[in-house]
Image (cartoon, rainbow, N blue to C red):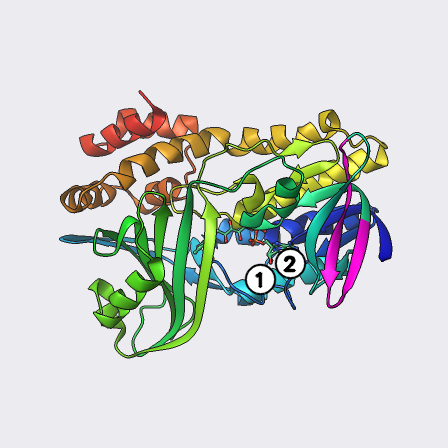
Amino acid sequence: MKELDFDVIVVGGGPAGSSAARIIAENGCTVALIEKEKEIAETVRTSGVTWISDIKKFGIPEDCYNPIKKFSFCSPKNSVVIQDKVAKAAVLDVRKTYKFLAKRAENSGSQVFVSTNVSEVLQDSNGNCTGVIAKSGEKQIQFNGKVIIDASGFASIVAKELGYVKQWKKFGVGAEFEVKTEKLEYDNWWLMVGEEYSPAGYAWIFPTSKNTARIGVGIGKPDSDVDPTVRLNELIENKAGPIKDLGQIEKIEFHYGLIPNEGLSRKTVYNNVILVGDSAGQANPLVLEGIRYAIRFGEVAGRVVADAIRNDNVNETTLLSYEKEWKKAIQSKINSAVKVQNRWVGLSDEEWDKELSIINELTADEFLDFIRADFGVSKMVKLATHHPKMVVRQLFNMVKGT
Ligand SMILES: Cc1cc2nc3c(=O)[nH]c(=O)nc-3n(C[C@H](O)[C@H](O)[C@H](O)COP(=O)(O)OP(=O)(O)OC[C@H]3O[C@@H](n4cnc5c(N)ncnc54)[C@H](O)[C@@H]3O)c2cc1C
């Protein structure tokens, strides 16, 4: 079997893996970025909604996204539109963005291996991980590394093989068609809630260009046993809600994916091993968006790992600064978002109609903070005590847990 040695092995060429690999290479370490598919982002498993402030921070080019400044919601008997003056949200061209991130990692010196499927882990006599074995075509390759980063997304292949984690039990399943539309308000997204759209989750229309959009359905498991693909086809066929305003629809591509939804339940650092992105469960549970966290904490993981290698100490205690940093950044926000999510999962159609009226009382900035789960303590206290509308004060009192 061919054997290759690197300082760091990153498993998974998604946003988390590419971001970690880039920072590691920039810091002078050797790194292998391993992706099982034939090319980066060959399969799209995400809707790609994110925020322009984050996109800019990450240096993602403008031709990788479609800006959004109108946020529309509909429930069975209500609908609200929150209009912003400038676009602060965006829908990514997922393939282009993920390829851009991987290319940037490669340009920084990472060695990218595609069509390379990691199937086994290697451990020394103390049980510490020393590398992985991957299948590439008919050949097997052994990758030896001082640190292994599990950025394999929902699969968490490394952590699972090491016996550190079990399969996620609570997760979201999403099915989506990228479509060409006859008519489209291309800076307006739609979130559709209530039993007809999704019994535990929501449906969406996310415009990707002047005449293309992603129409999808996300369903929480095990809360509901509805198949999102079946529901999606029904909604498109029946031209439900705002789908009818799109006119003729031509399906271009089908997307399907799974995303963990267990809050921050996982330990993400072990001797020589770090979990990042979906593998670590780092997603905003309110709308299950994790791309910006995958990139941001991929970069943190990269920095911590490169430092550890430079100092020749890659044990759990040293790598723990990664977990401390990302938890400090988002733990309390995620915990607050979990409370809102729990409230939303239990809403009946009539309650959704009322919830939309509460959302309608938020300004565009308040709404964005809310949907982004950007619940800073001082902002939350301000909304809970000083917002002119009592229903909003009640909502934020619930979020902050009083
Ligand atoms: C239906 C759906 C809609 C979503 N919508 C949004 C959204 O609108 N906005 C948002 O921010 N987030 C969204 N998310 C979540 C978002 O996709 C993830 O949080 C994000 O992609 C996590 O990045 P990652 O790098 O951790 O994992 P991934 O993007 O999943 O990348 C993991 C990579 O590892 C590779 N891999 C897996 N196993 C192996 C192996 N054995 N060997 C080698 N490679 C392997 C995979 O092929 C993949 O390329 C959505 C998720 C789903 C399922």
The residue carrying mark 2 is 101
Tell whether circle 1 marks a residue whose Cβ is less than 8 angstroms from ligand 1.
no
Q: Is residue 365 above or below residue 49?
A: above
Q: Residue 234, percent across and down? A: 25, 66
Question: Which quadrant holds the C terminus?
Answer: top left
Q: Quadrant of residue 214?
A: bottom left
On the question of residue 49 being in view, the answer is no
Q: Quadrant of residue 302?
A: top right
Q: Is residue 199 inside the magenta stretch? A: no
Label 1 crowd (10 A; few <14 / some 14-19 / many >=20): many
Looking at the image, which residue is at 54% across and 45% down?
Answer: 278
Q: Quadrant of residue 319?
A: top right
Q: Amino acid at mark 2?
A: Leu
Find the residue positioned furthest to the top. 402
Q: Residue 111, percent across and down? A: 78, 58
Q: In front: 302, or 67?
A: 302
Question: Which quadrant holds the N terminus?
Answer: bottom right
Label 1–label 2 contact, CB within 8 A: yes
Q: Residue 56, percent across and down? A: 56, 53
Looking at the image, which residue is at 75% across and 52% down?
Answer: 133
The residue carrying mark 1 is 97
Q: Which residues are magenta?
A: 127-143
Secondary structure, mark 1, is helix
Horizontal arrangement in the rendering, residue 217 relative to residue 244 (left or right): right
All told, the count of numbered labels is: 2
Looking at the image, which residue is at 54% across and 65% down?
Answer: 43
Label 2 crowd (10 A; few <14 / some 14-19 / many >=20): many
Q: Is residue 134 inside the magenta stretch? A: yes
Q: Of helix, strand and loop, which mostly describes the magenta segment? A: strand
Looking at the image, which residue is at 22% across and 70% down?
Answer: 239
Q: Amino acid at mark 1?
A: Thr
